[in-house]
Image (cartoon, rainbow, N blue to C red):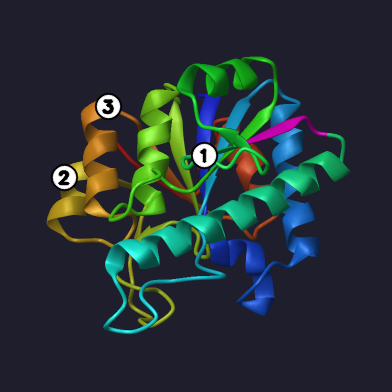
Amino acid sequence: MKYKRVLLKFSGEALAGSKKTGIDFDEVLQFAREIKECAELGIEIAIVVGGGNFWRGKLNTYMDRATSDYIGMLATTMNALALGDAFKQIGQEVRVQTGIEMRQVAEFYIKDRAIRHLEKGRITIFGCGTGSPFFSTDTAAALRAAEIKADALIKATNVNGIYNKDPKKFEDAEFIPHITYLDVLNKKLKVMDSTAISLCMEEEIPILVFDVHTKGNLKQLLLGENIGSIIS
């Protein structure tokens, strides 16, 4: 199956590359080039990016959770702007929209406007998560995928799919090429948070999980090849 419209979820750490924190602009440009190749095939691509390379969780046990989450939203906006700039450098039309209004920085997220950008071939990047605290960027990705009627939610990770336990810690971890939404929830697999999985299940949006660091994986995946794992 070749997908027409997809929502791609990047972690902030993916943009940091080997640096682990901040932004590795060589890595970001590489991602941008590969995504542009997919867009040139006629696939409409929206992106939600996390902010873990700048901010992850409360700084201390006394910090207000909502305040911490708002700081995280600002981190996702920095990543969205950096990724957007990378697309501009390689000649790809792009728009950045944010879930919190910041007029001088980016467009405010409006569903119909986002869909119009996609229809015109513009890659559209969503920053600020859902715009509300207490929700992860995984949930934001599921929400935006449902709103724009994406054919699939694609989760870019540092491993080649879903395992029954962390393959970096356990040599006997078993690869799972296909699994149902309910099995992910019941087995408490740490693919995405339960809110995101439940929303995708309700809206029947398949979740594809693949290794973002292997060149060519995304293009093959979008052309219908069996890359990584699928939740459906």
Location of residue 165 by image quarter: bottom left
On whether residue 130 falls in the magenta region, the answer is no
Q: Earlier in the sequence, mark 2 or mark 1?
A: 1
The picture places residue 22, in percent across and down from the top left corner, at 65, 72
Q: CA distance from mark 2 to mark 1?
A: 36 Å
Can residue 11 be seen here? The reply is: no
Q: CA distance from mark 2 to mark 3?
A: 14 Å
On whether residue 93 falls in the magenta region, the answer is yes
Location of residue 168 by image quarter: bottom left
For badge 2, the amino acid type reads Leu
Can residue 158 be seen here? The reply is: yes
Q: Dot 3 corresponds to which residue? A: 203
In-image side of 223 versus 226 (left or right): right
Q: Dot 1 corresponds to which residue? A: 101
Q: Residue at x 28, y 27 (%)?
A: 204
Q: Nearer the viewer, residue 148 or 18?
A: 148
Q: Nearer the viewer, residue 101 or 59?
A: 101
Q: Main secondary structure of the magenta part?
A: strand
In-image side of 21 versus 66 (left or right): right
The picture places residue 149, in percent across and down from the top left corner, at 42, 21
